[in-house]
Amino acid sequence: MRILVVGSGGREHALAWKISRSPLVSAVFAAPGNPGIAQVATLVPLKLEDHGAIIRWVKENRIDLVVIGPEAPLVAGLADRLGEAGVLAFGPSAAAARIEGSKAFAKDVMRAAGIPTAAHETFDAVAPALAWARARGGRVAVKADGLAAGKGVVVCGDVAAAEAALQAMLVQHVHGAAGARVVVEERLEGPEASCLCLSDGERVRLLPAAQDHKRIFDGDRGPNTGGMGAFSPTPNVTPAVEAVVERDVVLPALRELSRRGCPFRGVLYAGLMLTKDGPRVIEFNARFGDPETQPIMMRLAGDVVPALVAAAKGDLSGVELPVDPRAAVGVVLAAENYPGTPSRGDVIEGLEAPLDADVQVFHAGTAQRPDGAVVTNGGRVLTVCALGDGLDSAAARAYAAAARIRFRGMQLRRDIGKKP
Ligand code: AMP
Ligand code: GLY
């Protein structure tokens, strides 16, 4: 098979790496990719927004499967356009991807399907939203309805914080049109977990559960980021919790989307808070998580390609996903000043260090200069990922590999994999 991976982050590097190991695959391409992905795939300089150019290239190059990584092209309908052109695509339709693209839609689906989640209301004006927040002592999460690059959620502890968040979104329009409508929901407490599953619209195959570290600093301090590291398995997601998530979260969501005429084929990502009353959904994503995908791909023991094809074709019934019993830990190396405007162009040293087979360095915000040097080119630069017998051993190997890599202003958390 000839496979195109769409995207350029650590997630797409992990996907391209795993796909490239499949005996079914003769060629892997990535658009636009990055210098790390170039080690396992041929890069194609296509723009994610230019669906026409992507489809022309895919047709001319006889691609058998397109795997779409990021949410923006899914929400913009790339999977639909590929389907109309007769190309097999892994990733949901625009209508199904609204489960990520509109938080109000996601909440509506959850309410209709009886999925456990925080109580909420949707607002487009400050006064009624603030009254709702005040009735809960300001302990709410204020969420921009649309896509805001992972920055559209403000978790508030008092009324003043809730008012500031509402003003910023609804009056100052800090997220533009994405924040013209907000979801305000009760604030939940508990550890978080990321439960991802492949879906063919009806059936599911759970991927190994993972946990993300969202804040920039150790001990979950500082501002939110796209994710500073992830690990799998997480002790919080026992087989019993997994069974509850499949029965009470994932399957009801898929049934409700099908009932609405938009069956979900692709990866459904349930972001959960494990409260004392059981798992509650804090968000759905319509794609693989980043950085969760990096440890998840390292733990998949079999070939991922038949599973991606089966989900895309709409029949997962014969698919199994054997999982490596070892743990995987992925540590993100971020650029100076991230999650603010990151420094770019800093030379990365130590990438050529010989790696053991159970250690992988996935690239995200990297670029190659004409002289061959690899430099930083984004907030999250690399994810250093390792397998080990247990989380402590995997973390020790990942940190040992990360210690060989250097660039100016490099930031990393020291506690990845050590969450309760
Ligand atoms: P999201 O961008 O939807 O992943 O949300 C970002 C982060 O906000 C989540 O990872 C949680 O830590 C936090 N969050 C979202 N919703 C809630 C909630 N209802 N209660 C407490 N924290 C929340
Ligand atoms: N790591 C969180 C996400 O992919 O949305």
Image (cartoon, rainbow, N blue to C red):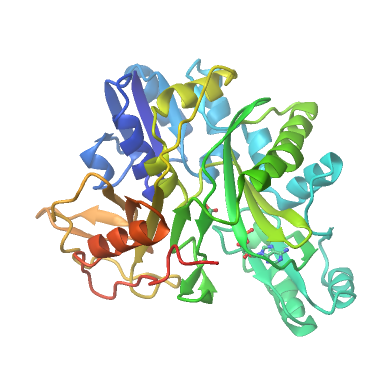
Where, quadrant-wise, is the C terminus in this rendering? bottom right
Rendered location of residue 416, percent (x, y) = 42, 65
Residue at x 84% of width, y 73% of height? 133
Question: Does the image show residue 55?
Answer: no
Q: Quadrant of residue 23?
A: top left
Q: Quadrant of residue 42?
A: top left
Rendered location of residue 324, percent (x, y) = 41, 39
Residue at x 84% of width, y 79% of height? 137
Residue at x 76% of width, y 26% of height? 261
Question: Please, is residue 85 above or below residue 256 in the view?
Answer: above
Side of 208 where 357 appears, left or right: left
Question: Does the image show residue 79?
Answer: yes
Residue closer to the observer: 416 or 379:
416
Question: Please, is residue 31 above or below residue 234 in the view?
Answer: above
Residue closer to the observer: 22 or 57:
22
Rendered location of residue 136, percent (x, y) = 86, 74
Question: Please, is residue 112 above or below residue 152 in the view?
Answer: above
In this view, the residue farthest toward the front is 389
Question: Please, is residue 355 above or below residue 300 in the view?
Answer: below
Residue closer to the observer: 47 or 260:
260
Residue closer to the observer: 180 or 134:
134
Where, quadrant-wise, is the N terminus in this rendering? top left
Q: How many marks?
A: 0
Q: Quadrant of residue 162?
A: bottom right
Residue at x 76% of width, y 41% of height? 248
Rendered location of residue 187, percent (x, y) = 75, 68
Side of 20 where 50 appears, left or right: right
